[in-house]
């Protein structure tokens, strides 16, 4: 195991820093935070379902509740690995 953080771990760290930064900016400029934008979207009759579907899709992907062969994000990653292996051999 490498002592350096993986690309995925760096991505999560970047995402957390981005979210905290945007929310701090919104707080100090008295604008909507990401949480408030999410809340307002799920209360809107048209925006509600795309937001809820995206939220469920991401949650199901992260908790591995979608079988690998039906998870488009996981199958993309597997296909990328297969293509990379084929190109390097």
Image (cartoon, rainbow, N blue to C red):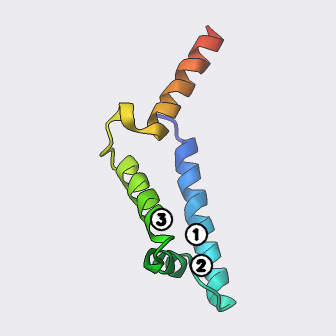
**Residue 4 appears in the figure:** no
Q: CA distance from mark 2 to mark 3?
A: 19 Å
Identity of the residue drawn at 57% across and 16% down: 85
Label 3, secondary structure: give it. helix
Q: Which residue is mark 3?
A: 51
The spot of residue 84 in percent (x, y) is 61, 20
Contact flag, marks 2 and 1 (Cβ < 8 Å): yes
Image quarter where the C terminus lies is top right
Mark 3 surroundings within 10 Å by alpha-carbon count, few (fewer than 14), some (14 through 19), many (20 or more): some
Left or right of 64: which side holds 31? right
Q: What is the spatial separation of the Cα atoms under label 2 and label 1, in whole angstroms?
A: 6 Å
Which residue carries the number 1 mark? 19
Q: Which residue is mark 2?
A: 23
Which quadrant of the figure has residue 88? top right
* Residue 79 placement (x, y as % from top left): 52, 25
Residue 89 visible, this orientation? yes
Q: Tell me the residue at 52%/33% (across/down).
A: 76
Percent x, y for residue 75?
A: 46, 32
């Amino acid at each position: 195991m490498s002592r350096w953080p993986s690309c995925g771990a760096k991505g999560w760290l970047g995402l957390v820093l981005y979210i905290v930064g945007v929310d701090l900016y919104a707080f100090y400029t008295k604008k909507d935070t990401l949480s408030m934008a999410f809340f307002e979207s799920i209360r809107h009759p048209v925006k509600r379902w795309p937001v809820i579907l995206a939220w469920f899709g991401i949650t199901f992907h992260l908790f591995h509740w979608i079988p690998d062969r039906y998870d488009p994000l996981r199958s993309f990653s597997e296909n990328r690995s297969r293509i990379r292996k084929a190109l390097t051999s």
